[in-house]
Image (tube, helix red, strand yellow):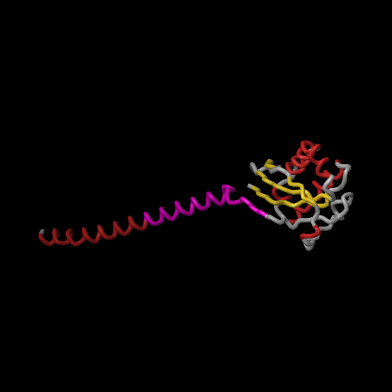
Amino acid sequence: MAEDVAKEEESAPAEKKSSNLLLIIIIVVLVLIIILGAVGFLLLSGDDDTVQQSAPQAKEKSVSKPKKSLAAAEFDDSRQLSEIGVLYPLDTFTVNLKSDAGRRYLKVTMSLELEGAELSLELDAKSPVLRDRIIRILTSKTLEEISSKKGKQKVSQQIMDTLNAMISDGTIKGIYFTEFVIQ
């Protein structure tokens, strides 16, 4: 009987050590699962899809004639700053992008390069109509259409062609994006 009590006392500390070790392993595994789940949730929720590009001197520049088709448009990033004409800044545009999977927003600030300073008076007079046309163009685009450099060039060319068709005192030679944020 004394031997049985001694055996029970020896096995009790061994069982406590193994149960403590098992408990520590279970806690560590649970913490890792929670951390991996949180990281996975953040990656799949779309919050990390924010694309922010800010260009104080945007290089997307069209030197094509206003009536050229979109396919024939040529962009030249090598123009000197001294060759840039009069710039006409526009207010910031914040629009919803065309999307099936959820809400995507586009925040754009741009400046128009004018052929001459006299065109700015006409642009001031037609400002609401110009903003409406630009908003319609931007809201018709998907994230995939505008997230690449080529996509931004196409949007720039489309805006330039649309605005040039509406004005009579000159032409818009280029569009510079000074802020382009997709969320």
Q: x and y percent of residue 142 in the render?
A: 72, 46
User: Is residue 18 shown left or right of residue 34?
Assistant: left
Judged from this view, the residue extending furthest toward the left is 2
Q: x and y percent of residue 30 in the render?
A: 41, 53
Q: Residue at x 71, y 43 (%)?
A: 91
Q: Is residue 35 magenta?
A: yes
Q: In which quadrant will I find the N terminus?
A: bottom left
Q: How many marks?
A: 0
Considering depth in this image, is 178 or 11 the residue closer to the camera? Answer: 178
Q: Residue at x 43, y 55 (%)?
A: 32
Instruction: Report whether residue 148 is seen.
Output: yes
Q: x and y percent of residue 160 in the render?
A: 82, 48
Considering depth in this image, is 29 or 107 the residue closer to the camera? Answer: 107
Q: x and y percent of residue 129 in the render?
A: 79, 37
User: Is residue 144 shown left or right of residue 122?
Assistant: left
Give the quarter of the image for residue 75: bottom right
Considering depth in this image, is 8 or 73 the residue closer to the camera? Answer: 73
User: Is residue 139 shown left or right of residue 32?
Assistant: right
> Overall secondary structure of the magenta stretch?
helix
Q: Is residue 108 magenta?
A: no
Q: Which residues are magenta?
A: 26-54
Instruction: Report whether residue 155 is seen.
Output: no
Q: Residue at x 79, y 51 (%)?
A: 86
User: Is residue 85 shown left or right of residue 27?
Assistant: right
Considering depth in this image, is 46 or 127 the residue closer to the camera? Answer: 127
Give the quarter of the image for residue 72: bottom right
Q: Would you place residue 90 above or below residue 54 in this image?
A: above
Judged from this view, the residue extending furthest toward the front is 117
